[in-house]
Structure formats: structure tokens, C-alpha cells
Amino acid sequence: MELLSARQMSEPVIPPERWVGVVDDEPSLRGSLARVLRLQGIRVETFASGEEFLLRLERGEPDCLVLDVHLGGLSGFEVQDILRARGTPPPIIFITAHDEIPSSRLCAAAGPCGYLRKPFDVNALITRVHYLLGRTVHDEPEVADTRSRRHESHHSLHWT
């Protein structure tokens, strides 16, 4: 798997107080996403559920959130609704393995931040996160469905 290198990113470096939350109930994917983002110099906190993530908000909100749609307990959409009710939610990148969710609902929920269908191109995630944190990469992120990249196994995150 070829990841974007730090040399491919333009300055400024992401300030250390900025962080990304990763909420997914699949431990191996959650860990893989955290490792990939940390390799990019991004501070990451992971959460196994929407409820666990919401408890963390007492200490501050993330600057970006990677949020699975289907979680045990609260869904990603319910977490988003709670964040909206609290005020301005952080930018959210929705991730999902379930094709039955209409793309129009995902696009509407994700807004300009987008969503990725699992398995997804890890560089697409990295690009989006950097973009949302205010750091540019050679190409701006695509905000539409990335199903066309689903079968690029050499760049995709896979889990059991």
C-alpha cells in the first residue's frame, strides 16, 4: 500500500492541538485507520461506539470526525444529529460497508465532507482529512461516492 508521504503535503504542519476522532465498532479497522492517520502526523483518538465518543466531548470536540454509519447503539446519523443539536458539528467523513443506504441520504448527511464505502482507498481518506484540517494535498478530495475505487485492493483497507 502506497501512502501519501509528508513531502507530498504542503505546509503548514497540522498543529498538535488539532485532532481527528475515528468512531467504528470494528476493532481492526479502527486500529488501521488510527495507524494510517498517525503516520501522516495527525493526532487521533478512537472510539468503539457513538456513546463512547459523545462522552469524550466533555473535554472538547475533534477538528474532524471519521464516523461509521452502522454502529452498535447509536448510529452515525444519530451521533451527527446530537452534534448538530449541540451547535456546529465538526466536519464528518462517513464510512459504511452497507450498500443499501441510498447514496442521496449519505450525501445529504455528509454535506461537503463526503463519505467512503468500505473497503476504500486509504489515500482518499488521508486526502479528505488533510483537506478538512486545512492542509492541502496535490488534489482536493472528491466529495462524491467513491465506489469506483472499491476494487483497488492495493490501496484499500480490508478487514475480516
Image: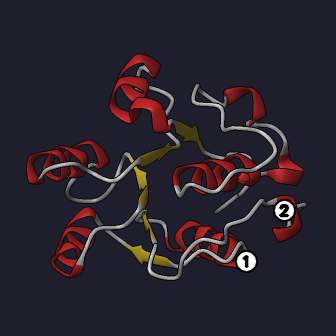
Picture residue at 43% right of the left edge, 58% below the top: 64
Q: Is residue 31 above or below residue 29?
A: below
Position of residue 70 measured from the top left corner of the image (x, y, whole percent): 36, 48
Marked residue nearer the N-terminal end (2 or 1): 2
Determine crowd level at label 1: few under 14, some 14-19, many 20+ residues with C-alpha closer than 10 A: some
Disc number placed over residue 123 in the picture, else none: none
**The N terminus lies in quadrant:** bottom right
Position of residue 4 measured from the top left corner of the image (x, y, whole percent): 83, 60
Report if the CB atoms under discs 2 and 1 are less than 8 Å apart.
yes
Which residue corresponds to mark 2? 3
**The C terminus lies in quadrant:** bottom right
Which residue corresponds to mark 1? 39
**Which of the 4 image quarters holds residue 149?**
top right
Determine crowd level at label 2: few under 14, some 14-19, many 20+ residues with C-alpha closer than 10 A: some
Q: Does residue 26 appear to the left or right of 128 in the view shown?
A: left
Position of residue 128 measured from the top left corner of the image (x, y, whole percent): 61, 47
* Viewer-proximal residue among 114 and 78: 114
**Which of the 4 image quarters holds residue 106?**
top left
What is the three-letter code of the residue carrying label 1? Leu
What is the three-letter code of the residue carrying label 2? Leu
Picture residue at 37% right of the left edge, 45% below the top: 69
Element type where label 2 sits in the image: loop
Q: Is residue 128 above or below residue 10?
A: above
* Viewer-proximal residue among 4 and 6: 6
Q: Is residue 112 above or below residue 154?
A: above
Q: Does residue 43 appear to the left or right of 108 in the view shown?
A: right
Element type where label 1 sits in the image: helix
